[in-house]
Image (cartoon, grey):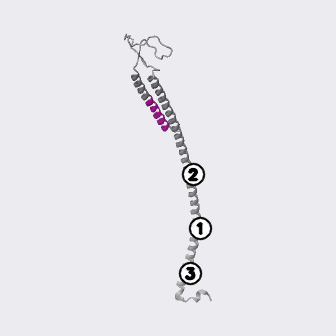
Amino acid sequence: MRLFDLIPAQFRIAAIGSMLVVVVAGSAALAWTAQDWRYGRVLERQARLQADTLNEISQASAALQRTEQDKRLALELRLHNKDETHYKELTDEQTKQARLRDRLATADLRLSVVLAATETTGSCSVPTTTATGRVVHGTARAQLDPAHAQRIIGITDAGDQGLIALRACQAYAKEVSTPK
């Protein structure tokens, strides 16, 4: 006697259908599990590749950031050195102007101007012979009042400071605008 003969006739079709459903479901479950294993390996490989790619990108970004930071620090150092240089020039010029003002105030130094060659006033002209310490050699010279000389020195001092500040600004603009 076979197992198939033991099933009543009215239930044989349902039994065959259920067996077919069990076989189909079992093979589907087996195929599903095999696909899950394969797809799991594919996903794992993709995740590892993505992690490696992200790691490389972050390392490249960090290297670029370090490079840019080094450039910025080098620029800051150059600008700091330029600032120190210009500050030293400015203080040296101020010291020189202060010494010149002091020499004018103590009558150690007198400013004089060259008079026009056509003017023939003899009352306030300085002798036409030049001494060894003179800078300008002219025919007739007149000494300036010490107060006027102080004002002239103040004007030249402001001009010198302006020129030094202008050079500092130009050096700063040049340093910042040129890529290195």
Give the alpha-carbon distance from disc 1 to disc 2, as whole Å. Answer: 33 Å
The residue tagged 1 is: 37
What residue appears at the point 58 percent right and 65 percent down from the top-left corner? 40
Q: Magenta segment: does it hold 9?
A: no
Q: Position of residue 106 (x, y in %)?
A: 45, 22
- Front position in the image: 118 or 149: 149
Nearest to N terminus: mark 3 or mark 1: 3
Q: Secondary structure at mark 1?
A: helix
Give the alpha-carbon distance from disc 3 to disc 2, as whole Å. Answer: 59 Å
Give the label on residue 59, or none.
2
- Front position in the image: 94 or 15: 94
Q: Quadrant of residue 155?
A: top left
Q: Are marks 3 and 1 in contact (CB under 8 Å)?
A: no
Magenta-colored span: 160-177
Q: Position of residue 114 (x, y in %)?
A: 41, 15
Give the alpha-carbon distance from disc 3 to disc 1, as whole Å. Answer: 27 Å
The quarter of the image holding the N terminus is bottom right
The residue tagged 3 is: 19
Query: From what the image shows, is residue 170 above or below residue 136?
Result: below
